[in-house]
Amino acid sequence: MTDGSRYAPSVRPGSQPAARREPANLGDILERVLDRGVVIAGDIRVNLLDIELLTIKLRLVIASVDTAKEMGIDWWEHDPWLTGDSKALQDENRRLRARLDALENRSLESGDHHD
């Protein structure tokens, strides 16, 4: 049994061999995944003597930016740390801290202590 024909597909006379699919390369697979999107979901639970100690819910969406926008996901357009508006966020934080300090000082000066 050394002939290679035992692994070759059998072809009847007059029929055409089955069309072979070319193996998809990594680029093709990645393009398909990003075009359609993939959702991976899972839960991790840690129990001890039937007492639930910890539950972690994981949700992962892998998609292209265009596909994500079609799904209504666009958080990166509004995140100040990603859009370059972090300076405005830091300025607002400074102003709020100054107002809080002023309110606390005013409360301490009026003798109203709530510790």
Image (tube, rainbow, N blue to C red):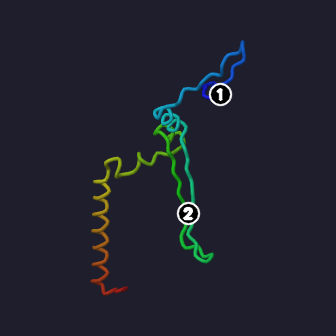
- Residue lying farthest top? 14
**Residue 82 picture location, percent across and down:** 35, 49
User: Where does label 1 land, which residue?
Assistant: 6
* Residue toward you, 26 or 40: 26
Image quarter where the N terminus lies is top right
Please report the residue visible at 65 percent of the width from the left and 22 percent of the height from the top: 18
Above/below status of 84 relative to 11:
below
Image disc number at residue 44 = 2
**N-terminal-most mark, 1 or 2:** 1
**Label 2 environment density (alpha carbons within 10 Å; few <14, some 14–19, many ≥20):** few
> Separation of disc 1 and disc 2 at Cα?
48 Å
Residue 30 horizontal side relative to residue 112, left or right: right
Q: Nearer the viewer, mark 1 or mark 2?
A: 1
**Secondary element at tag 1:** helix
* Residue toward you, 88 or 24: 24
* Residue toward you, 71 or 109: 71
